Amino acid sequence: MKPGASTPLYQQIFEEIKAEIDRGEYKPLEKIPSEPELSQKYDVSRITVRRAIEELCAEGYLVKKQGRGTFVSTPRINRRLLQYEVARSFTQVCEDNGMTPGAHVIDRQIVPVRPDEAEFLKLDEHALLLYIQRIRTADGQPIFEENVFLPYEGYQQLLTRSLEDASLFDAITEIGGRRPVHTPRRTVEAVRATSEQASRLAITANDPLLFLNVCFADENDEPVCIGRQYYVGSRYRFVL
């Protein structure tokens, strides 16, 4: 490190560790040295090291795992986001990127339909929906919080079916006979993680998330389900 340089010490450490990751000296999912070890290596204070590590986590190069240390992130997942492309499940997107998909069920409920949901799904105002919430992972790293709403009538089996490490699109197709193929409506906006989301996604409260609100239809443009997903921005990239 160069104490007299115009670039702050934490930024120099940031660039050095980033370069080591880019060169492959630190591999994806590999644990990096502890803060005391890095402090000694660079001959700087732990506060300086901590600032560099926090910046690297915010940029998506590193991820902290409580009680275990700090690890190199997996490469960002790329997903094309074109208005009329065929919808691909997260399982397929992971396979496209050479990663192993995973899923952990957080909650399942029967809930009343809301006006916007009833309008898209062509249901009456008294209909019930099945709500499924999961955390989706790639190579074991949390990528997004999945919230899916679909008509309870016809999809009751999903209330008890095992959805751990499984494709929900495949299950929907098998049970209902119609696969989500098109996305006639979708919006993307930036939001901040709640404390609960942060805990589940292994990030910090108020970290940026990409909120994708999307309506899925089958090959005949008939409505199937609605997804409201919260992606960790540093781990997932939409390609336009």
Image: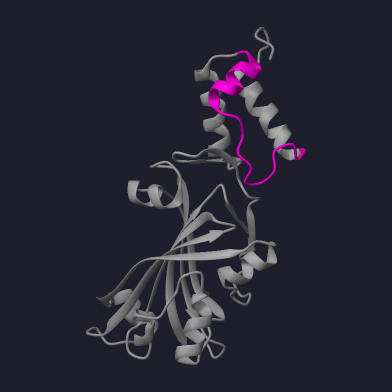
Q: Which residues are magenta?
A: 23-43
Tell which of 176 and 186 is nearer to you.
Answer: 176
Query: From this viewpoint, is residue 239 visible?
Result: no
Tell which of 195 and 218 is nearer to you.
Answer: 195
Give the quadrant of the C terminus.
bottom right
Residue lying farthest to the left in this orientation: 126
Horizontal side, residue 198 vs residue 88: left or right: left
Magenta stretch: includes residue 40: yes
- Residue 197, x across and y down, in percent: 38, 52
- Residue 195, x across and y down, in percent: 34, 46
Tell which of 76 and 104 is nearer to you.
Answer: 104
59 versus 170 height, above or below: above
Tell which of 95 and 165 is nearer to you.
Answer: 165
Give the quadrant of the N terminus.
top right
197 versus 32 height, above or below: below
Query: From this viewpoint, is residue 11 visible?
Result: yes
- Residue 12, x across and y down, in percent: 66, 21
Magenta stretch: includes residue 142: no
